[in-house]
């Protein structure tokens, strides 16, 4: 039983005890007083009447008239005159009918009053004995009315007491509820600070909980900072603070293998021509400054287009990956302007050629880099800021105009969405859920998401596609009874109608809600934290699970990640590639898994290529794996 219920029962019991006690004492005292006064009245009236009868003639008629007159003028139940032997000489009686007092009350407080007795004398001889009993109906009425008044006043006092007690209970319940919510939040790895109540005892408890919450938050913050420092030390160039060659190429490889909208985009390379001569001419410090300034210009461009990644391939070459960007002319123009403005700011003669190309799902990383390297050599021969764009072969383009893409996508969505199924397994080869990337039928073939998602986002059709995927996934889950992962885009999260419709559809299928795992890109947590928090809490209340996909080394930088209520994170495939032979990546993944677990979040690795890699990841503390080397069979083998 809860403390509040116990408090209410205690208050109710005390009020009831006070009422019963007061009523019992009041009625008992009044009854005793009435009995005492009635007994005195009986005795006095009997003595007075006996004295009158003793002084008059003892004629039977006269005695009868005197008794009748006394009986009629007073409130008596019985007056009787007995001879010395006990025989009745004369008697008058009246019934005690009480019609305005409940019979149960009369039986409960029945008066027990002895009759008044007096001796009637005839000279010096005893003539008889007179007995007199007063009528009790008036006493019953008086006691009943006083009981009703007492009950009414007590009911009023009890009502006021209950209202006051209700206010006090609410004042106590509010900080208790805050403490309970705070304790539950800490259990869910959300570290909130509660307001301190005015009640001293509760204030001490809340202060202790707040100190605990802040201490754990600070501890996790320190772990996140350590993880970020480890990441920078292992993956970032010490001069420019950009990614080094290996993690950058791993990121490119994960894009090329992706089933999501980042499976295609633009890849650019920038070179400082004749770096050795520049270093000799400017000096080591000035050359480092030049490298940093180039990296900052590229980083600005990456932030301008969003989702971009900058890295240093070697001493003189930088690379820029821009997922979901396909306008080579616009990107090339912006890149050339930034490089040219940097060259104009420098007093030294520096050549900064660049080359660009588009990348698509399934292409080889080596071929892309070789193509760009040749184009970069061609750009270097064009002048200080020469640029070469490797145009996409026309055969690989499905549609060339926006209206063609819009019509084709609309028709494909009307035909329906096909979901692929890729298992996510735990360390015991048990199914966690199925990843379900979407397929659309374009030009007579089912095309993977990497082909059409960039155009879906460009045409503002992401909410339509995501709702179609949600409906297909819910139908699939209802039929198979197996959990499924549903990808939502960042564009859809910013659409209020989409969020409302999503919640309504899940609420209508609460029977399968626990089997729905919703995934959003990590960028959403960095760019739309409040919208993500609102969606997480709404879906978690319905029993769904919400997580982030493509989580990279910026996981520790997500503000308020402990308050989002995330159920899982999927670590980007770029971090799991070649993990068997790379101690630096193992250290980083172990730290990310530890941080996720400290927040109560499941950690899953994407892009796992073999069973050996999966075993290494499980040994590092990850909870699940998925990728091309993971398959779910009856025996649970992974190849």
Image: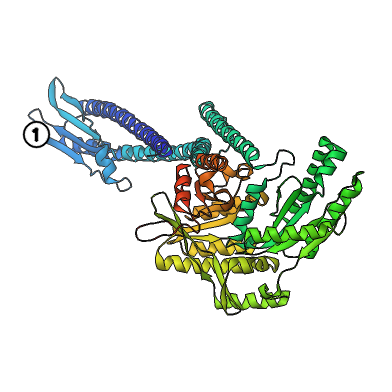
Query: In this orientation, which residue lies closer to the viewer: 80 or 339?
Result: 339
376 above or below 38? Answer: below
Residue 95 image-quadrant placement: top left
What kind of colouring is applied to the model shown?
rainbow
Q: How many marks?
A: 1
Residue 449 image-quadrant placement: bottom right
Q: Is residue 490 visible?
A: no
Query: In this orientation, which residue lies closer to the viewer: 613 or 370?
Result: 370
Q: Position of residue 538 (x, y in %)?
A: 54, 54
The residue that label 1 is drawn on is 87
Whether residue 13 sits left or right of residue 345 in the image: it is left
Q: Position of residue 504 (x, y in %)?
A: 54, 63
Q: Residues within 10 Å of mark 1 (few under 14, many from 20)?
A: few
Q: Is residue 357 visible?
A: yes
Image point (48%, 42%), residue name: 620
61 above or below 252? Answer: above
Q: Position of residue 21 (x, y in %)?
A: 35, 31
Whether residue 281 sits left or right of residue 77 in the image: it is right
Image point (53%, 42%), residue name: 586
Secondary structure state at the residue bearing disc 1: loop
565 above or below 359? Answer: above
Q: Position of residue 420 (x, y in %)?
A: 50, 67
Query: In this orientation, which residue lies closer to the viewer: 127 or 260?
Result: 260
Image point (64%, 55%), residue name: 252
């Amino acid at each position: 039983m809860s403390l509040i219920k116990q408090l209410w029962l205690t208050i109710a019991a005390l009020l009831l005890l006070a009422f019963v006690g007061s009523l019992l004492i009041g009625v008992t005292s009044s009854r005793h007083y009435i009995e005492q006064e009635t007994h005195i009245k009986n005795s006095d009236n009997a003595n007075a009447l006996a004295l009158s009868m003793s002084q008059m003639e003892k004629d039977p008629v006269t005695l009868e008239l005197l008794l009748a007159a006394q009986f009629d003028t007073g409130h008596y139940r019985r007056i009787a005159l007995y001879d010395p032997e006990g025989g009745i000489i004369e008697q008058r009686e009246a019934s005690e009918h009480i019609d305005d007092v409940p019979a149960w009350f009369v039986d409960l407080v029945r008066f027990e009053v002895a009759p008044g007795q007096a001796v009637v004398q005839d000279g010096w001889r005893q003539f008889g004995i007179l007995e007199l009993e007063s009528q009790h109906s008036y006493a019953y009425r008086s006691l009943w009315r006083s009981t009703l008044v007492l009950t009414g006043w007590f009911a009023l006092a009890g009502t006021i007491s209950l209202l006051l007690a209700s206010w006090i209970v609410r004042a106590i319940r509010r900080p208790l509820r805050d403490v309970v919510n705070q304790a539950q939040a800490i259990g869910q790895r959300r570290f909130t600070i509660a307001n301190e109540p005015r009640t001293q005892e509760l204030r001490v408890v809340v202060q202790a909980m707040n100190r605990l919450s802040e201490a754990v938050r600070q501890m996790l913050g320190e772990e996140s900072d350590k993880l970020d420092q480890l990441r920078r030390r292992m993956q970032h160039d010490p001069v420019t603070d950009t990614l080094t060659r290996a993690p950058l190429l791993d990121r490119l490889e994960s894009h090329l293998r992706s089933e999501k909208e980042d499976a295609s985009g633009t890849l650019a390379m920038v070179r400082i021509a004749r770096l050795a001569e520049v270093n000799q001419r400017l000096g080591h410090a000035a050359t480092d400054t030049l490298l940093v300034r180039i990296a900052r210009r590229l980083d600005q461009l990456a932030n301008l287009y969003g989702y971009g990644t900058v890295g240093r391939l070697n001493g003189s070459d930088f690379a820029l990956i821009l997922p979901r960007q396909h306008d080579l002319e616009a990107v090339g123009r912006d890149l050339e302007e930034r490089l040219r403005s940097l060259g104009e700011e420098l007093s030294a003669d520096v050549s900064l050629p660049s080359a660009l190309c588009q990348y698509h799902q399934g292409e080889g990383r080596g071929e892309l880099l070789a193509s760009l390297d040749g184009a970069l050599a061609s750009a270097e021969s064009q002048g200080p800021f020469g640029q070469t764009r490797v145009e996409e072969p026309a055969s690989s383009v499905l549609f060339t105009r926006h209206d063609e893409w819009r019509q084709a996508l609309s028709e494909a969505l009307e035909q329906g969405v096909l979901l692929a199924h890729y298992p996510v397994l735990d360390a015991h080869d048990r199914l966690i859920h199925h990843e379900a990337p979407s397929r659309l039928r374009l030009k007579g073939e089912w095309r993977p998401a990497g082909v059409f998602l960039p155009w879906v986002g460009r045409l503002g059709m992401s909410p339509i596609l995501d709702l179609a995927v949600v409906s297909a996934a819910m139908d699939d889950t209802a039929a198979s009874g197996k959990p499924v992962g549903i990808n939502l885009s960042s564009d859809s999260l910013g659409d209020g109608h989409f969020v409302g419709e999503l919640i309504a559809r899940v609420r209508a299928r609460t029977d399968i809600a626990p089997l729905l795992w919703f995934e959003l890109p990590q960028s959403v947590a960095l760019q739309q934290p409040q919208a993500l928090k609102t969606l997480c809490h709404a879906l978690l209340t319905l029993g769904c699970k919400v997580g982030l996909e493509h989580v990279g080394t910026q996981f520790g930088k997500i503000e308020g990640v402990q308050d989002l209520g995330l159920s899982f994170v999927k670590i980007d495939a770029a971090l799991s590639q070649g993990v068997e032979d790379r101690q630096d990546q193992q250290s980083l993944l172990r730290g990310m898994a530890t941080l996720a677990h400290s927040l109560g979040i499941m950690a899953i690795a994407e892009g796992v290529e073999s069973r050996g890699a999966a075993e290494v990841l499980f040994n590092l503390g990850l909870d699940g794996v998925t990728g091309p080397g993971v398959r779910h069979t009856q025996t649970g083998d992974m190849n």
